[in-house]
Amino acid sequence: MRDAIRTPEELLRFLDLPAPLLEGAIRSARIFPLLVPRGFAELMERGNPADPLLRQVLPLRVEDDSSEDAVRDAVGDGAARRAPGLIHKYAGRVLLLATGSCAVHCRYCFRRHYPYGDEPGRLEDWRPALEYIAADPTIHEVLLSGGDPLMLPDVRLFDLLESLEAIPHVERLRFHTRLPIVLPSRVTDRLVERWMDSPKRVVIVVHVNHARELGDECRSALQRLVRAGLMVLNQSVLLRGVNDSVESLATLSEALVNLGVLPYYIHQLDRVGGTLHFEVSEVEGRELLTRLRARLPGYAVPRYVREIPGEPGKSDVFAAD
Ligand code: SF4
């Protein structure tokens, strides 16, 4: 991450982008800083402000919206916090916010306002969360999210894993991570071996929105995970200007399936402040997914879901039909 791009000036220069973008980018980066690994920026098309990868990371003036129905916590994380770093919303599974750090700052992120500074840093700070999980035998799955759990150094990640593996009723450990995509070098042999050696079922959920994110290094990282026998799923967010066409969704799904990664979810955007310019209406989303279903085999079509605070799970957008 040492050579990651961290300022709008640097990103615009690196990609030969028009100077008028700079002022808005600087202003919006003050609220949610710009962060892009250099290898991910290298996958972007130079001189193209509409590049679908660039759109995910470039701060824009339009983020400064004042829409009344956009909120800071659209998914109800705050109300479901049971211990520092632990969110318990759904039956049978809990979410651990393993770290507040990410390798990339996605402008549409629903956790862009989350107060990560209040969450645990060291293993001993996790004690209340671990005790909560150990005390509830109905919890069979722990999701490690963030931020991005793979931002933790191995020593801290493995300590946390060991503590979770020691809880008998936890059967599955699920990692939600974007690092195999934006920083594939993080998928080291040591990490893969540690996951393979786990006595629990390890599930990796990556996050790709557009097929061009799957560069050579990323493909090889994903293939290593698949060949190691780990279950690898993908989730995307339906994003205006990124993947809001049948062509783009079909190309992504096919590329994932060819790598052995199952397209799992496509999320309706959570209406968080500063992200509404990415929104695709549900009406349009349904139309896109219906056309995708007609084009691909069933297993290659992700479930179109949205999160409604207080609901017992993700809501299938088509369920009301
Ligand atoms: S990597 Fe995930 S948590 Fe981090 S900014 Fe992107 S979407 Fe948000």
Image: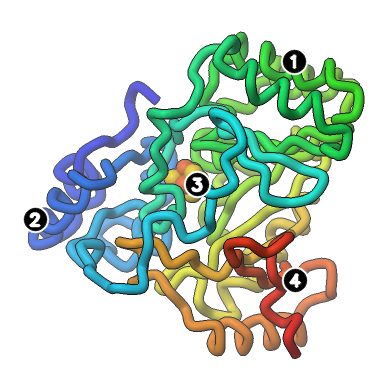
Q: Is residue 99 left or right of residue 21?
A: right
- Looking at numbered disc 4 in the image, what kind of residue is underneath it? Val
Label 1 sits on a secondary structure element that is helix
Label 4 sits on a secondary structure element that is loop
For label 3, being within 8 Å of ligand 1 is answered no
Rendered position, 298 above or below 194: below
Mark 1 lies on residue: 163
Q: Which residue is at the front of the view, 199 or 213? A: 199
Label 2 sits on a secondary structure element that is helix
Judged by depth in the image, the label closer to the viewer, 1 or 2, is 1
Quadrant of residue 295 within the rendered picture: bottom right
Mark 2 lies on residue: 23
- Looking at numbered disc 1 in the image, what kind of residue is underneath it? Ser
Q: Is residue 293 visible?
A: yes
Q: Position of residue 162 (x, y in %)?
A: 76, 14
Q: Is residue 240 left or right of residue 22?
A: right
- Looking at numbered disc 3 in the image, what kind of residue is underneath it? Gly
Mark 3 lies on residue: 78
Q: CA distance from mark 4 to mark 1?
A: 36 Å
Q: Residue at x 74, y 38 (%)?
A: 174
Q: CA distance from mark 4 to mark 2?
A: 39 Å
Dots 4 and 1: beta carbons under 8 Å?
Answer: no
Mark 4 is surrounded, within 10 Å at the Cα level, by few (under 14), some (14 to 19) or many (20 or more) other residues, namely many
Q: Which residue is at the front of the view, 226 or 72? A: 72
Mark 4 lies on residue: 301
Q: Position of residue 56 (x, y in %)?
A: 39, 57
